[in-house]
């Protein structure tokens, strides 16, 4: 039981609370942004991807997602819709937060559990990028050959500009992705940095303690001789 219960390490506890807060923040903001420009829409159509839904910018008279799907149909691309992974985003985030806090207060001595939690934080942004790029590839390589405008297969970029004839899309990561990335970096670096600082401070304090003890011993011997 001593291996499971005890006082939590403060550096890990503080780092885990901050990381959990950052990760929870990613639930409420978009993770990815795409702007599509076409001759019909010279001002562009904007779509945001949250962890669990797609949403338009809300700043135009169009339903941006519906219009983007209309253009996709015109070139033979499947409509954009939520996939199974997106339905797992909220439960996954909540499970990771609960596991992090549980390990912080209960299994505080089990270092391999901490390593597992850190891996979980890194898995979130890495899996998001890999999964999103996979689906972009899938959309670009399952084109309908009978579409009014046959562009052929292509791979939209998860980050950057993709041009196909007189259409082009510009994609970038949004604040939610950077919150996930910041959470992973923070929970990895802060406990390591705190441990390094504590060890350095302890090593620096040892010579002073030894010198103080030696000085007191010499003074005692002088008093005895006198």
Image (cartoon, helix red, strand yellow):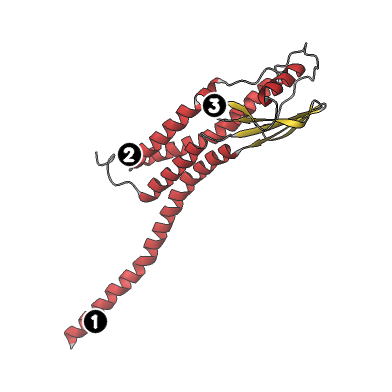
Position of the N terminus by quadrant? top left
State the image coordinates of residue 53 (x, y, percent, origin top left). Answer: 57, 26
Q: Residue at x 51, y 44 (%)?
A: 185
Q: Secondary structure at mark 2?
A: loop
Q: Is 160 placed above or below 203 here?
A: above
Residue 52 is labelled as 3
Which comes before the other along the chain, label 1 or label 2?
2
User: Residue 186 got which mark?
Assistant: none
Above or below, comparing residue 14 to residue 81 in the picture: below
Q: Distance between the Cα atoms at labels 3 and 1?
A: 72 Å
Can you identify the residue that label 1 sits on? Answer: 219
Label 2 crowd bin: few (<14), some (14–19), many (20+), radius 10 Å: many
Circle 1 packing at 10 Å, graded few (<14), some (14-19), many (20+), is: few
Of the residues tagged 1 and 2, which is closer to the observer?
A: 2
Numbered disc in front, either 3 or 1: 3
Contact check, label 1 and label 2, Cβ < 8 Å? no
Residue pictured at 43% horizontal, 46% vertical: 15
Instruction: Name the quadrant containing residue 175.
Output: top right
Q: Is residue 189 above or below residue 129?
A: below
Q: Nearer the viewer, mark 2 or mark 3?
A: 3
Q: Is residue 183 left or right of residue 74?
A: left
From the viewer's perspective, is residue 65 above or below residue 192? above
- In the rendered structure, the answer to whether residue 83 lies left or right of residue 94 reads right
What percent of the width, then of the height, locates residue 69? 69, 20
Q: Are marks 2 and 3 in contact (CB under 8 Å)?
A: no
Residue bearing mark 2: 107
How many marks do you count on the picture?
A: 3
- Image x and y of residue 116, in percent: 43, 36
Quadrant of residue 51 within the rendered picture:
top right
Residue at the location (57% across, 20% down)? 83
Q: Residues within 10 Å of mark 3 (few under 14, many from 20)?
A: some
């Amino acid at each position: 039981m001593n291996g499971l219960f005890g006082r939590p390490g403060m550096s890990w506890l503080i780092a885990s609370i901050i990381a959990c807060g950052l990760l929870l923040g990613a639930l409420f903001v978009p993770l990815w942004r795409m702007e599509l420009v076409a001759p019909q829409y010279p001002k562009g159509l904007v779509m945001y991807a949250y962890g669990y839904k797609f949403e338009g910018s809300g700043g135009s008279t169009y339903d941006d997602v519906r219009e983007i799907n209309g253009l996709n149909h015109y070139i033979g691309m499947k409509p954009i819709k939520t996939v199974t992974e997106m339905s797992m985003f909220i439960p996954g985030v909540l499970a990771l937060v609960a596991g992090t806090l549980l390990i912080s207060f209960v299994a505080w001595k089990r270092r391999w559990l901490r390593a597992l939690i850190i891996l979980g934080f890194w898995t979130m942004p890495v899996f998001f990028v890999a999964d999103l790029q996979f689906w972009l590839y899938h959309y670009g390589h399952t084109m309908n050959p009978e579409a009014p405008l046959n562009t052929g297969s292509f791979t939209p970029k998860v980050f950057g500009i993709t041009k196909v004839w007189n259409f082009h899309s510009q994609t970038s990561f949004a604040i939610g992705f950077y919150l996930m990335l910041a959470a992973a970096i923070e929970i990895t670096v802060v406990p390591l940095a705190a441990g390094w600082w504590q060890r350095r401070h302890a090593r620096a304090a040892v010579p002073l303690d030894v010198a103080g003890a030696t000085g007191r011993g010499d003074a005692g011997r002088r008093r005895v001789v006198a």
